[in-house]
Image (cartoon, grey):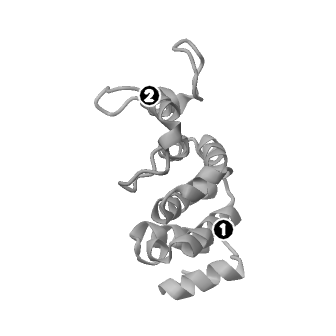
C-alpha cells in the first residue's frame, strides 16, 4: 500500500481513526513505510534491536488490519512480510510475537490449521515467547477449541500445560 496518493481508494481499516478522532491508520502506516523505505539500507541491522524497516512496517499493517476487523488484509500483509529474507533478519522474539498475534486472523478466517502452524513456528523460533506469553496461551486454547489439531499443535499444548477444553 505504499505510494498511494491522498485520493487513492483505501480499505476501510486504513481509514479508521483512533477513538479520539486522531490520525487515520493509513496516514501513520504510510509515514512509517516512507521512513522505512528511505532508510531501507539500514533496516534490520540496528543496534537497538527494534528491527525497523519495510518488513516491520508490513507486520504492523497486518496487526492493525487484524485489530480493525480485516483478517483477509491481515493475512495478506503477514504473507507479504514473512515471504522475504528480511523476515529472518528481525529479532526472533519479534517474529514469534507476530506469529502469535496473527493466529487470531487465521482463526477469524476459519483456518485453525494455519493458526496452529503459526503457533508451532513461533515456538520453534522463540520458545519462551510461546510458552510464557499469556496471548500465546489464549491463542493456543482457541486453536484447540476450534476442532481437531495436528500432532505438533497437541505436543505444544502439552508442553505449555494446556489440554483440550
With 11 as the anchor, is 33 left or right in this view?
left
Q: State whether residue 22 is above or below residue 142.
A: above
Image quadrant where residue 1 sits: top right
In the rendered view, tell whether residue 29 sits above or below residue 90. above
Pointer 1 or 2: first along the chain: 2
| Position of residue 133 measured from the top left corner of the image (x, y, whole percent) | 41, 71
Quadrant in the rendering for residue 70: top right
Q: Is residue 73 visible?
A: yes
Residue 125: image location, x then y, percent: 56, 70
The percent position of residue 20, horizontal first and vertical second, equals 28, 30
Q: In the rendered structure, find residue 68 and report the number of the disc placed on it.
A: none
Q: Compared to 11, does 80 lie above or below?
A: below
Q: Which residue is mark 1?
A: 117
> Which residue is found at the position 45% from the left and 45% from the top?
52
Q: Is residue 135 above or below residue 25?
A: below
- Element type at marker 2? helix
Q: Label 1 crowding class (10 Å Cα cut-off): few <14, some 14-19, many 20+? A: some
| Whole-percent x, y for residue 2 in the image | 57, 28
At 55% from the left and 74% from the top, the residue drawn is 123
Q: Which residue is mark 2?
A: 31
Q: Residue furthest top?
A: 7
* Label 1: element kind: helix
Would you say residue 108 is visible in this rendering?
A: no
The residue drawn where x is 47% and y is 51% is: 45
Measure the C-alpha gap from mark 1 to mark 2: 32 Å
Amino acid at each position: 500500500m505504499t505510494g498511494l496518493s491522498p485520493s487513492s481508494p483505501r480499505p476501510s481499516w486504513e481509514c479508521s481513526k483512533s477513538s479520539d478522532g486522531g490520525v487515520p491508520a493509513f496516514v501513520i502506516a504510510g509515514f512509517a513505510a516512507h521512513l522505512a523505505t528511505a532508510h531501507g539500507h539500514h533496516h534490520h541491522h540496528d543496534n537497538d534491536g527494534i528491527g525497523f524497516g519495510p518488513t516491520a512496517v508490513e507486520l504492523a499493517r497486518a496487526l492493525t488490519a487484524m485489530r480493525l476487523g480485516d483478517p483477509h488484509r491481515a493475512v495478506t500483509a503477514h504473507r507479504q512480510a514473512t515471504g522475504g529474507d528480511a523476515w529472518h533478519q528481525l529479532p526472533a522474539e519479534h517474529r514469534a510475537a507476530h506469529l502469535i498475534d496473527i493466529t487470531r486472523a487465521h482463526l477469524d478466517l476459519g483456518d485453525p490449521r494455519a493458526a496452529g502452524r503459526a503457533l508451532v513456528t513461533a515456538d520453534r523460533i522463540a520458545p519462551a515467547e510461546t510458552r510464557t506469553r499469556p496471548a500465546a496461551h489464549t491463542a493456543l486454547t482457541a486453536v484447540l477449541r476450534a476442532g481437531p489439531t495436528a500432532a505438533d499443535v497437541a505436543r505444544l499444548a502439552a508442553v505449555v500445560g494446556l489440554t483440550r477444553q
